[in-house]
Image: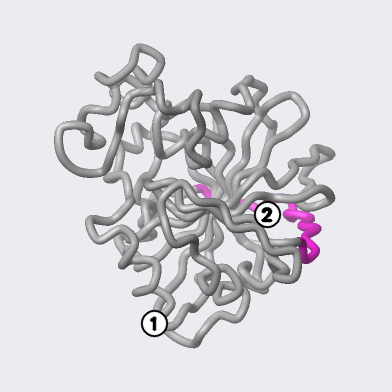
Amino acid sequence: MRSHRFLIPFAALMAVAGPVSAEETTAPHWSYTGEADPEHWGELAEAWHACTDGSLQSPIDIEDAAAVDADLPDLEVAYKPFPLTIVNNGHSLQVAGAPDNGFDIEGHHFDLVQFHFHTPAEYHVNGKTYPLELHLVHQRDDGALAVVSVMFDEGAENPALEQVFAHIPATVGETVTDPDVLVDVAGLLPQDHRYYRLMGSLTTPPCSEGVNWYVMEEPMQASKAQIETFARLFPEGDARPLQSANNRLVVRDVK
């Protein structure tokens, strides 16, 4: 599995789901409903044309019947607790990453830049959707992006998730930083690290393609209260509709 080299400016990456800044206020408004909804994202800015014209857009419905089975390389994850910095940017809740957190695969290292959530889940698996999805966004030194996706089904309370949801900013654009609250990314991942591997895009403007996606096969659990806590922030949802798979290669880890 070869990593694809491409460059996305760091500021653009953070604008995908980042804090509101003076620079970002000049960017076109986009949303999940109304005249600036996903159907119109590609019309809002020339740089966002991939949202309409791209051929490897995300999310898709991942189907085992259409996937190629293979013994894929392990995700060599290395996450350790770090102080919480969280923002409600109006599109999701985003938690900033920290140094010495990320994963290695086939000799390449990806650093954790940030993670955020979607409700309902954006990716479907064999036609099934989940009430919550986590995107762990990583970047390589050359700018290449990799996103680890984790689905959450309703079940037991997740302590690592509670550490995040218990400190939601009161207003959109507000950043909460608490050095006494430690983010446990490892607690947001399933014990079984088998994954679906595919190439796709960012699921928000500018919808840039060339993103390495690792969608965990095993879902995690979150309590009904935790799922509702996030869903109340975005009552219309913050999930992009499914995109065409366009016969792209999806590889399923069967080690």
Q: Dot 2, crowdedness within 10 Å: few (<14), some or many (≥20)?
A: few
Query: Residue 120: x and y, percent?
Result: 32, 61
The answer to which of marks 1 and 2 sits earlier in the sequence is 2
Label 1 sits on what residue type?
Ala
Q: Which residue is mark 1?
A: 225
Residue drawn at the location 77% of the way across and 29% of the way down: 141
Label 2 sits on what residue type?
Asp
Residue 110: name its quadrant.
top right
Q: Name the disc covering residue 93, or none.
A: none
Along the line of sight, the residue nearer the viewer: 157 or 183: 183
Query: Residue 184: x and y, percent?
Result: 70, 69
Q: Is residue 136 left or right of residue 181?
A: left
Q: Secondary structure at mark 2?
A: loop
Query: Residue 196: x and y, percent?
Result: 54, 53
Q: Is residue 157 left or right of residue 120?
A: right
Residue 252 seen in render: no
Along the line of sight, the residue nearer the viewer: 25 or 152: 25
Residue 72 seen in render: yes
Indicate whether residue 76 is drawn in magenta: yes
Magenta residue span: 68-82
Along the line of sight, the residue nearer the viewer: 25 or 68: 25
Residue drawn at the location 62% of the way across and 40% of the way down: 146
Q: Which residue is mark 2?
A: 71
